Image (cartoon, rainbow, N blue to C red):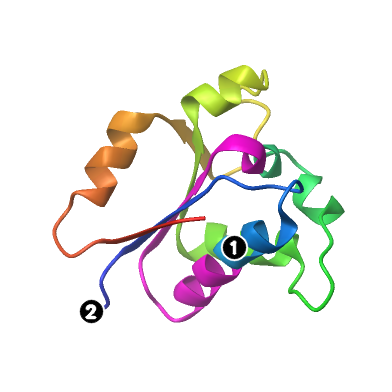
Amino acid sequence: MARPLVIKVTAGADAPERCNQAFTVAGAAAASGVPVSLWLTGESAWFSLPGRAAEFSLPHATPLDDLLALILSAGRVTLCTQCAARREIGPDDVLPGIRIAGAPTFVEEITMDDVQALVY
């Protein structure tokens, strides 16, 4: 079995290539059967809201909403608690399947045996 992959994306529309790289890697991992956990932090927190990923556009890139749907169907997506609070995003605001959790949960995920962690 493949090693689980935890990806933390801090960039959003403010750094589109870096943001898309994180979603692309997470999507490729999910499509390949790798257990993947994508954390939305900083400006990427906005993509937890319905319709926001569809608004993102980057030439020659898979649409972000397609990647997010793939990751949600095969992996886990988490919105950072503090990032959500700073943007006044609550549990009822986010897309189905996205959970809100904080640093202790992130630390727990990345310190499990055989986990690979990436930050974008």
- Residue at the spot 86% in from the left edge and 52% down from the top edge: 55
Amino acid found under the numbered disc labelled 1: Phe
* Percent position of residue 2, x then y: 27, 77
Q: What x and y, as percent, mark residue 91?
A: 58, 26
Mark 2 = which residue? 1
Q: Height in image: 51 above or below 59?
A: above
Residue 42 vs residue 39: left or right?
A: right
Q: In front: 47, or 50? A: 47
Q: Check disc 2: other Cα within 10 Å, few if <14, some if 14-19, many if 20+.
A: few
Q: Quick one: 115 or 15, which is closer to the camera?
A: 15
Residue at the disc numbered 1: 23
- Which x, y percent locates residue 119? 45, 54
Q: Which mark is residue 13?
A: none
Q: What residue range appears in magenta?
A: 24-45
Does the image show residue 91?
A: no
Does residue 51 appear left or right of residue 71 in this picture? right
Q: Earlier in the sequence, mark 1 or mark 2?
A: 2
Kindly state the secondary structure of the residue where label 1 is placed: helix
The location of residue 105, given as percent across then percent down, is 31, 35
